[in-house]
Image: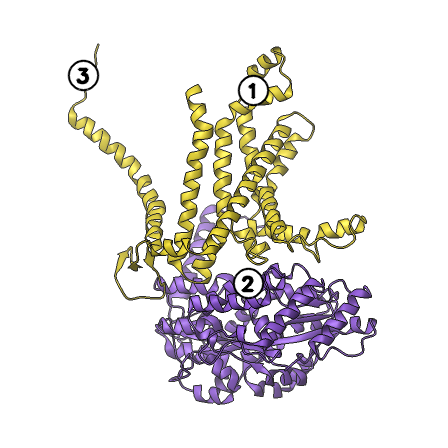
Chain colours: A purple, B yellow
Amino acid sequence: MRSMDRRTFLELAGIAGASTLLTEALPSVARADKPINFSGWVFKPDTVKDYVSFYNQKFTGQVKYEAIPWAQYHPTMETRAFAGEIVDVMYCNHNNRERWFESGLIRAVDDLPGVDELKRKMNPANLDSLKSKDGSKLLGLPYFTSLFVLMYNEPMLAQAGIKAPAKSWDELIDQCLKLKKDKVSDTPFLPNWNASPSGTMPQLMTDCFSEGAQVFDAKNQLIVDQEPGAARALERWQKVYKADLVNPEVLTKTSSTDTHRLMWTGRYAYHTNHSYYLKTIAGEPENSKLAPKKARMTMYPGTGQTYMWTDSYVLNAKTKVLEDAWKFTKFLGGNLNGDWYVQRQWCLISGLDNPYPEMYDHAEIIKSYDRWIDLALLRKQYEKGKVIAAYKEPWYGEYDTRAVPIVHDMIRGNTTVAKGLKDLVKLQKSLA
Amino acid sequence: MVPAAAPRSARLSEAAFAWGLVLPAVAAVVVVVFLPLLYSFWMSLADVNLLRTSGPALELFGVRVPLFRFVGVQNYVRVFSDPLYWSSLWRTAYFVAAFVAETALVGLAMALVLQERFAGRPVMRSLLLIPWSLSRVVVGLLWLGILDFEFGALNGLLDNLGVIDGHIAFFKNGFSALNVLVSVYMWNQAPFATLLFLAAMQSIPGELYMAAEVDGAGYWNRLRYVTLPAIRPIVFLVLVLATVNGFLMLDLIYILTMGGPGNDTTTISWLGFQTAFNFFKFGPGTAILYTLTALCLLLTLVYHRLILARFEPES
């Protein structure tokens, strides 16, 4: 092997370093003038990196991507804005969008080219979700949409001689009691009662809707104490918990992701969670005992209505590269140059649902969904998706978190349903 | 020969030289410790909205530091009138008391064992540090893997041995979940206490033990009359560190319980974190956390009086 003396090594290292610096420093004629800073919470960051690389290559962009852990994502973006940093394009969940808009962190996108076409193509409920509280401004483009669905373990029901999944809550409880009694499952029911913002509270709204109850009135005031359907939903929750039909530790699971993984074991008969989780439960044999397609979805019992929400890509109000940032946002949340690349990829890779109905006419997407879900049924469930506007209120985030212990106390029977519902209303009023 | 007194200018320059030497360190402490402390205390007395960019501000090293609107003790009044604060405080008191007692006792017991001579002692001393060297997120995930109702290794083991009929739900009951948090945190922190106790024990002169043996003292009497009095300053240090760490513990709650079920594992630090970083109420959030600081200082004074004050005159 050829040896290298210290002088030669230093010379070569110097040349290499200088050439790297020069390459970075020299203006590239093919690239956009200024880089676009893009941040999102951690969800498949390698996939997002691939999207960014694809964009930078195809559109000669200079997007710099950074993934921030979910739990600290929104506070981090706020403290950065506070320090004067401008992140041009950001993820924003539905609970924080209005706050960010009213505080001047993000801008509306109504005046930007091509937005009217995207509005026309979007499902009206999702479009409504993305608008400002007064309904006059569009605050971003969709990252994904989702709703709660009911999944069931087909082999377990067959083993117990149950011919069809439950169509009503009473039937579901009867089936779970039978499964427990026959020792087919210790805890046949797995509701998404975890303590995170994606767990207990949206699950409660879903079950209230399925019982025909309203949760908020037209002025976004909580009215669960006046709704018999809300009381019915919570009494049912108390009943299944008391009868030991649910995993006793589901209340301390820290995320919906952790909760859905329990379903992988094949030890539960029914599970309620976000629709896209069925992709890993029924579509990933390497992880789940219920794949391929041993777990299925069925229409939500009762009215069939479930809670639906839309998370988004938003534009920084102080961006100095508005044209480029909007182009990149359209690449992520729309159809830049007629191509729904990122929207399509999220459907294919993660089963994230999409607010543009035309996505589901795509042969590739239909084939992909067929591997893990009955797409026609999912679309039917989407027709029953119900959005709320209360999350646009400044108090919503705190209410949503502080309400969880009250609901958990009702589930555990530490407080009566009537008192718990009154406490929820009292909490909301104290924050409004 | 008596040396001539140094001229006044030389003495002054010596003092100036000394100040010059310590000034960088003092400046670093002021910037890194005192300024953030003062600023966060100011936040606890202000109405803070991080997104509000208008209003008065200081310009420090090119960074705009908003001064926010002064609201006096309003944040503290709001915090003290919240029943959740008081229930969290009592829960925190239980958590800290149990954690400090467990850490001190287990740490001392392990130190006493490792002080004895036996084969494999060096390896044991090295292995001892592993729990302490792990990140708390890893510790949380590790114990979740051991204690989980569904996947937990402990439930699996006990089930396979036929010791239990059904799996144990360690996190179902709030009090049980709180005690799990205490024990897991103790597992993580006791090795450091052991290390401190061991270091103190090794500095005790062997003659004291020999003299005690001559006086007919057995193992327990040697422990009581020689070891414990000699390591008293370290006991003080361990108690102070364990108390402060106990009050501030947050990450295990985040990984294991999220403050639940209900509010049954919500401590003051978790409440402060939630208020500041989930509800974006940095004023009340820092006010909550400053009450913790006050409690830590108070307990440090109590420990000092109980343990060190009696020790110092003897020395």
Q: Using the numbered discs, state the Cα–Cα distance from disc 3 to disc 1 in whole angstroms.
A: 53 Å
Q: Left or right: B232 with respect to B57?
A: right
Residue behind mark 3? B4
Q: Residues within 10 Å of mark 2 (few under 14, many from 20)?
A: many
Residue A179 x/y as whole percent: 79, 68
Residue B131 x/y as whole percent: 60, 43
Task: Residue A406: give its label.
Answer: 2
Which mark's residue is nearer the viewer, 2 or 1? Answer: 2
Badges 3 and 1: C-beta atoms under 8 Å apart?
A: no
Q: Left or right: B248 with respect to A209?
A: left
Question: Which quadrant of the figure contains the C terminus of chain A?
Answer: bottom left
Residue type at mark 1 is Tyr
Badges 2 and 1: C-beta atoms under 8 Å apart?
A: no
Residue at the spot x=62%, y=37% of the render? B128
Q: Left or right: A316 with respect to B264?
A: left
Q: Are marks 3 and 1 on the same chain?
A: yes
Residue behind mark 1? B225
Residue at the spot x=46%, y=70% of the render? A396
Q: Secondary structure at mark 3?
A: loop
Q: Secondary structure at mark 2?
A: helix
Which mark's residue is nearer the viewer, 3 or 1? Answer: 1
The chain that hosts pointer 3 is B
Q: Using the numbered discs, state the Cα–Cα distance from disc 2 to disc 1 in whole angstroms.
A: 53 Å
Label tally: 3
